[in-house]
Amino acid sequence: MNGFRFVATLLFVIASAWPAAAEPAAPLLTLSQAIEYAQEHSHRIGAAEAGSRAAEAGWQEGRSNRLPRIDVIETVSYTTNPAMVFANKLGQENFTLGDFALDNLNQPDPLSNFNTKLAITQPLWMGGRVKHGSEAARLTFESASWGAERTRQEVVGQVIEAYTHAVLAMNQLETAQESLKTAQANSRLVGDLYETGLVVQSDLLQARLRETEIQELVIRSESAVTLSRAALNMTMGRELDTPYSLHSFIPQRGTPEEPLEELLEQAQRQRPDLQAAESQVEALRRSARAGKGGNYEIGLTGLAEANAEDFIGADGTNWSLILGARFTVFDGKGNGSRVRQAREHGLAAEQMREMLRKSIDFEVRQAFHGLRASRQRLEQAMLARQLADESLRTVRDRYGEGLTTLVELLDVETALTRSRTRILAARRDVLLSKAALDLAVGRL
């Protein structure tokens, strides 16, 4: 009987230690390393950052409308068109009295002309379109930047979930393997008692049936380990079959419980997606204001021109300074419709922002109570594990002395398996609940 006690104690120590089952040659991947790698290589983060850079380029484009535009224009013509020949000769400053002859005016010889023009255009006033348009572009960039930060936080949350799922799958496999060892030990015990005639054959068959059930659990657990490891690689943004090893325990974040009201206030103040929504609302307001100036424009243009029969020549030069103004009286309500469209988009964005505020409030409350419940479940799971270990030792001794049935022994062994799984899942739930709370508050 002392031998059975020793085996039971040894199995308990091995199960409590949770030894690593990872390949020794593969590099160890910690949770912090997984998060750091994902922040550098995640496709979601890369796409969000590219969108932010595109919005920044749009802002730069909007600011460029405040600056003068400089164009160098080169045109080449070879023509017998009377009007063009007449104008080009004047531009080349090669016009003579002989060119007034009717034959020369009506049927001129072909003339080549290289026209080089430098144009500088400076908008002076555009009804606020440049000012508000540039500010709208800046706010759009700001919104995209906040959105990229929220994406980063979400990816971190996904990495934590995938990492802990991979560790849990590995631990569940180890638990299944330990349960298989327990079931095999029970089968050997029942077999020995059957050989001595102390138990009936049905007990032996039930013990072996239980062993096959645990063997199936091991097979399913091995498949879950493979898939969970590939899922973690995918979340991190690397090849799915990249090898790595994991600690066989789920890291804990033992922070004390924070007041709910402080968490709610903090979330409303720093959630990146709420900041993005605020910027988007203001950007649409600015766009509506910019659209109101679409019917007005005043600008100044300076021209310097050279004409010659040869390329890059300057036989004749001239310059012009042009002040232009445009006031659209009627455009079929086109600009007014665009302004109204921007205004309605702004109102829709305001509604979405308010809905997001309430959603954030709910997410924080849900995560807060979820974390509290997860911690309580972990305490109960740890207690259940202690009770199951003691119960298995007691019932195994009683069965060896013929004081109980195999059914009770198998039930206790099943309860121990469940308690092992419960405590692993509870540890993971605590970590995920803490990450969910941090994500809801906007500080992950």
Image (tube, rainbow, N blue to C red):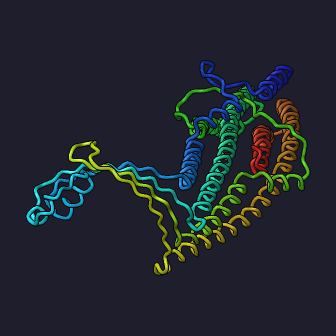
Where residue 208 appears, as percent x and y from the top left, is: 66, 35
Where residue 223 appears, as percent x and y from the top left, is: 58, 37
Nearer to us in this view, 356 or 97? 97
The residue at 65%/56% (across/down) is 139
Left/right placement of residue 424 relative to residue 324 reads right
- Choose top left, top right, bottom left or bottom right for residue 427: top right
Left/right placement of residue 322 relative to residue 156 reads left
Where residue 301 appears, as percent x and y from the top left, is: 45, 58
Q: Is residue 194 visible?
A: no
- Choose top left, top right, bottom left or bottom right for residue 212: top right
Where residue 202 appears, as percent x and y from the top left, is: 69, 39
Q: Quadrant of the C terminus?
A: top right
Nearer to us in this view, 103 or 44? 103
Q: How many marks?
A: 0
Left/right placement of residue 294 relative to residue 276 reads left
Q: Quadrant of the N terminus?
A: top right
Left/right placement of residue 379 relative to residue 301 reads right
Nearer to us in this view, 193 or 161? 161
The residue at 76%/38% (across/down) is 424
The residue at 48%/64% (across/down) is 323
Nearer to us in this view, 152 or 109? 109
Instruction: Tell me: residue 280, above or below residue 394.
Output: below
Q: Is residue 243 visible?
A: yes
